[in-house]
Image (cartoon, grey):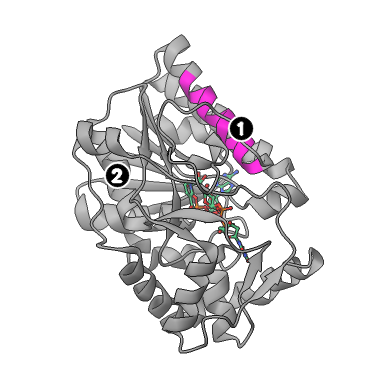
Amino acid sequence: MRALVTGGAGFIGANFVHWTRAHRPEVEIVVLDALTYAADGSSLGAVRDEVELIQGDIADSSLVDRLVKDVDQVFHFAAETHNDNSLTDPSPFVHTNVVGTFSLLEAVRRHDVRLHHVSTDEVYGDLELDDPERFTEATPYNPSSPYSATKAGSDLLVRAWVRSFGVAATISNCSNNYGPYQHVEKFIPRQITNVLDGIAPKLYGDGLNVRDWIHVDDHNAAVWTIAETGRSGETYLIGADGEQTNRDVVAAVLRELGKPEDAFELVRDRPGHDRRYAIDSSKLRTELGWTPTYPDFASGLKATVQWYQQNEDWWRPQKAATEAKYAKTQQ
Ligand code: NAD
Ligand code: TDX
């Protein structure tokens, strides 16, 4: 099989390439990535020479057409992904997430190539802290931020191309990922690297928002399961029962780095901040037999803290510019 991986130099995409080299060594991989601020070619590490890396925009339809024509499957990870950035400037989110997905859909339609579209649980909006329900595939779309609205738009485009044009595509909506190679703008790497730099972790609002954490390798194993055994046109939710308040995550990071658990700072809240996400992944587990392999969030987080301690060369170049950006919004 020859596969096109969009966004393969970003956090989840690079981990997907590593996972694929380790578990599906027969697959030939072409990575298409615009190498935005969020990408780092070095995240591909030892497998960099085993894949073809093309720098380009997924909205460039002639480039995309040329690449899609020669593959059997597209794994579509490329996106603008940070909610806070989407509140400052939504424009690249519309371009990449909506127009870029449209360009890929037209190419897979022309060449009859199967697509797996990687999306997020944020398309469903949020839940109250005490709501006994979790998101399922039947939950109505109700996105809150420009980021999640553009991801919702991209999901709906995929569904329409399946129904109207018979494109073969699957969709997954996953909860919050953590693990190596995640940009320091995101919550967990930001707090780990803050503590390593002697800065207090910054919690938005009251710090009681809840996210449902999953290790990036469990996400990527699920993406393969869906691409190989999922039914075309279906959506599958991916989650590992990892609900945590942001305060509890920060306390665990501080504990891991030998600091008092209350050594954090409450800062300005994110406008429109979703309160809680929670995934019911029964469909994926019962229909396709997927289960997460990381035993619990605590051990996965410990390994992630160690990875950032040992890989300062990887994150240091991004740190100052990221914090300067946050300083402008008092976060
Ligand atoms: P990321 O920001 O780390 O990486 C995104 C990658 O896409 C980068 O390498 C970037 O250069 C590339 N890219 C951006 N615009 C592009 C364009 N126009 N053309 C080509 N490449 C472009 O993001 P991530 O966290 O790895 O997320 C990957 C996917 O997974 C996204 O679709 C995101 O919505 C989805 N997702 C992420 C999470 C999470 O917790 N991080 C959870 C669920 C779903
Ligand atoms: O410094 C911070 N302090 C803080 O309290 C940052 C950066 C975040 N937060 C809070 C906001 C959220 O409640 O932590 C939580 C997680 O924040 P992010 O890492 O920005 O993730 P989130 O907004 O939940 O979105 C993530 O998960 C779903 C990814 O960035 C998305 O790409 C994915 O779709």
**Residue shown at 34%/68% (left/top)?**
300
| Residue 123: percent from left, percent from top | 54, 36
Mark 1 falls on what kind of element? helix
Region rendered in magenta:
147-159
Camera-nearest label, 1 or 2: 2
**Residue shown at 24%/62% (left/top)?**
295
In the rendered image, which quarter is residue 297 located in?
bottom left
Instruction: Tell me if residue 60 can be seen.
Output: no
**Disc 1 residue: CB within 8 Å of ligand 1:** no
232 above or below 281? above
**Residue shown at 51%/29% (left/top)?**
155
Instruction: Tell me if residue 37 can be seen.
Output: yes
Task: Say if the magenta span includes residue 266.
Answer: no
Task: Say if the magenta span includes residue 149.
Answer: yes
Number of marks: 2
Task: Please give left or right for residue 219 compared with residue 101 in the image.
Answer: left
| Residue 28: percent from left, percent from top | 28, 46
Q: Amino acid at mark 2?
A: Ala
Q: Are marks 1 and 2 in contact (CB under 8 Å)?
A: no
In the picture of the structure, the residue carrying the numbered disc 1 is 98
For the stretch drawn in magenta, what is the main secondary structure?
Answer: helix
Sequence-first disc among 1 and 2: 1
In the picture of the structure, the residue carrying the numbered disc 2 is 222
**Residue shown at 53%/35% (left/top)?**
124
The quadrant of the rendered image in which ligand 2 is seen is: bottom right
Mark 2 falls on what kind of element? helix
Q: Quadrant of the C terminus?
A: bottom right
Q: Quadrant of the N terminus?
A: top left
The 10 Å Cα crowd at callout 2, few under 14, some 14 to 19, many 20 or more, is many
